[in-house]
Image (spheres, rainbow, N blue to C red):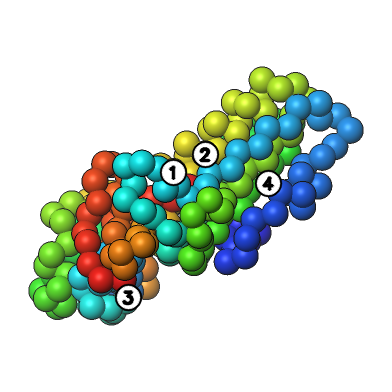
Amino acid sequence: MPYLTASPLALEPLLAEVTAPECGGTCVFLGTVRDGPGDGGVTGIEYSAYDAMAEAELDRILAEARRQWGEARIAVRHRVGLVPAEEASVAIVVATPHRADAFAACRYLIEEIKRRLPIWKKELRADGTATWVDPAGHPSMVGPR
Amino acid sequence: MKAAVLATATVRVRFFARYAELAGRAEGTLILRLPATVADVLDRARDEWPGAAAIPPAPLAAVNRRHSRLDAPVTDGDEVALLPPLAGG
């Protein structure tokens, strides 16, 4: 199951994957490339991945979610390559019979994705610099793009 | 009859993102005497490829596409990956 894609993320196909008559609640999470006031003019993020492991790890994460929320229908995609600011880098769609489970499963999936997926991002800035991002807090290294 | 025990292991080492830049390579092959752990692979990698010496003392690691502790054993044919701080999502 290829979860990683170099193409822009489209929501409609993911919604179509999970839609089912027995599911009355669908929760969508999109993570987008941010250029906030403290982010220093981010024009985009270059995502790179350990592809084979990221795919395997997502298989494991989705299997865990399906064990915990047996009726959940789940679709996940994560982008690799250059993602311009404001575009989505990750999309998670979860449909369940009732809304509480959809919210809970969606939250579980994004937290595990952030904690476990072997994916890295290099922030590209308007001034031509590029920075590897360490989500534990601080940029880990600055250099020419 | 006991199974034969390999005296050495050939391990594929992979570097990603910032660690690939530091090591100056995306992958390499090491031959280690057994028994050996992920930490032994890391030590040997630092010796073999000078740039890899700049990788922090206790990085995240994976063996055969699963997260792994540094004290986990490695065997012949394993793929050992050294992972910078994860930043997916």
Q: CA distance from mark 3 to mark 4?
A: 31 Å
> What is the residue that sits farthest to the right in this orientation?
A21
Q: Is residue B40 left or right of residue B80?
A: left
Distance of label 2 from label 1 (alpha carbons): 6 Å
Chain of the residue where label 2 is placed in the rendered structure: A
Q: Secondary structure at mark 1?
A: helix
- The type of residue carrying mark 4 is Ala
Q: Are marks 3 and 1 on the same chain?
A: no
Q: Which mark is residue A114?
A: 1
Determine whether A92 is above or below A57 in the image: above
The label number, if any, that marks residue B26 in the structure image:
3
Q: Are marks 3 and 4 on the same chain?
A: no
Locate the N terminus of chain B by quadrant.
bottom left
Across and down, in percent, residue A42 comes to: 39, 55
Q: Mark 3 and mark 4 in contact? Answer it, CB < 8 Å.
A: no
What residue is shown with label 2? A110
Q: Which residue is mark 4?
A: A75
CA–CA distance in space, label 3 to label 1: 23 Å
Q: CA distance from mark 4 to mark 2?
A: 12 Å
Q: Position of residue A26 (x, y in %)?
A: 73, 32
